[in-house]
Image: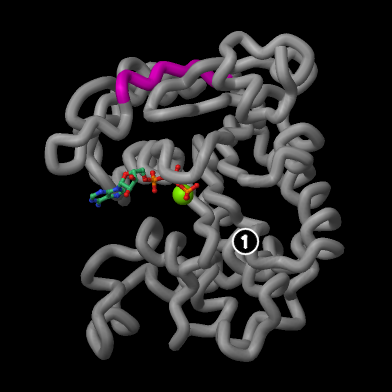
Amino acid sequence: ALSLRGIHKSFAGNPILKGISLDAEPGEFIALVGPSGCGKSTLLRILAGLETADGGEIVVGDRDLSPVPAADRNIAMVFQSYALYPHLTAAQNMAVPLVMRKLTRAQRLPFVGPLLPGRRQAVAAIRREVQDMAVSLKIDHLLDRKPGQMSGGQRQRVALGRAMVRRPAVFLMDEPLSNLDANLRVHARGEIVELHRRAGVPTLYVTHDQAEALSMADRVAVMIGGSLLQLASPQVIYDDPAHVEVARFIGQPR
Ligand code: ATP
Ligand code: MG
């Protein structure tokens, strides 16, 4: 499914990722935790192709994605800030990845595009997919609103919808719930796990919230100082931390 092999990254000579290796099973939910600044977001950005690694391999299926540009990786990422386009409606935001995939460059041109053969059918198919996803996320009543006209929780669902319509091979989420209040957050946990199950693809989920990691993940990856110190079930991480740093971070003395 997803394999990372020896991912290295330095910024201005400072090693940030010191050889990260990890194998995720096809439908596995892995929570990535670790102190602020340990390199979690950098790792996700490298997987998504938003940043290049200095070394290492990213293998999805049996293909090394390292040389593949972000747009062709079929890896979807949900950010803490949701990163929705503020000038587009929810429907248009969710349609962006489909438009990029299903319309040719010429079909996307204003004035010219609409006249090209096949475009009308492609646009209708995109509308249907967005509508179906919106119904399943219960945001179909929000499709005409722009991000500025939605609550944080609603924006978060639109961002999830935009990631889901791509039917990605891998899901990356970087603290997608940290902007929500406590009630909404607990509710959203269950929904994300449910979406993940339905998609059936490996998910790497960064969180600061240990309760979240414990309740959502099949396995928890503990990253400290640019190294993955332990990758195990929540139970094992809590009961039997492999390193004193892991124990210290998880808050339980050995
Ligand atoms: P947090 O939990 O606070 O989000 P994190 O684990 O996601 O932290 P990263 O954002 O991956 O941490 O950053 C890891 C380290 O790399 C930090 O010291 C950060 O300052 C540094 N860093 C990240 N991006 C860059 C960049 N583009 N240029 C220079 N340094 C960077
Ligand atoms: Mg981060």
Give percent across and percent down for residue 246: 59, 21
Left or right of residue 239: residue 175: left
Please give the name of the residue rendered at 78% of the width and 14% of the height, measured from the top-left corner. Answer: 239
Q: Which residues are magenta?
A: 18-24
Quarter occupied by the C terminus: top right
What residue sits 36% from the left and 42% below the top? 42
Q: Nearer the viewer, residue 116 or 230?
A: 230
Q: Is residue 217 magenta?
A: no
- Residue 138 higher or lower than 164, as above or below: below
Give the percent coordinates (x, y) of residue 88. 47, 84
Residue 198 visible in image: no
Residue drawn at point x = 43 percent, y = 19 percent: 3
- The one of 226 and 27 positioned closer to us in this rendering: 226
Give the image location of residue 168, x and y in percent: 51, 43
Say left or right for 129 vs 106: right
| SS at mark 1 in the image | helix
Q: How many numbered callouts?
A: 1
Residue 136 or residue 148, whichever sits in front: 148
Q: Is mark 1 within 8 Å of ligand 2?
A: no
Would residue 3 be seen by someone viewing this image from the given angle?
yes
**Residue 21 inside the magenta-drawn segment:** yes
* Quarter location, residue 75: top left
Main SS of residues in magenta: strand
Q: Amino acid at mark 1?
A: Gly
- At x 13%, y 42%, the residue is 12
* Rendered image quadrant of residue 250: top right
The residue labelled by disc 1 is: 161
Relative to 9, is 228 on the left or the right? right
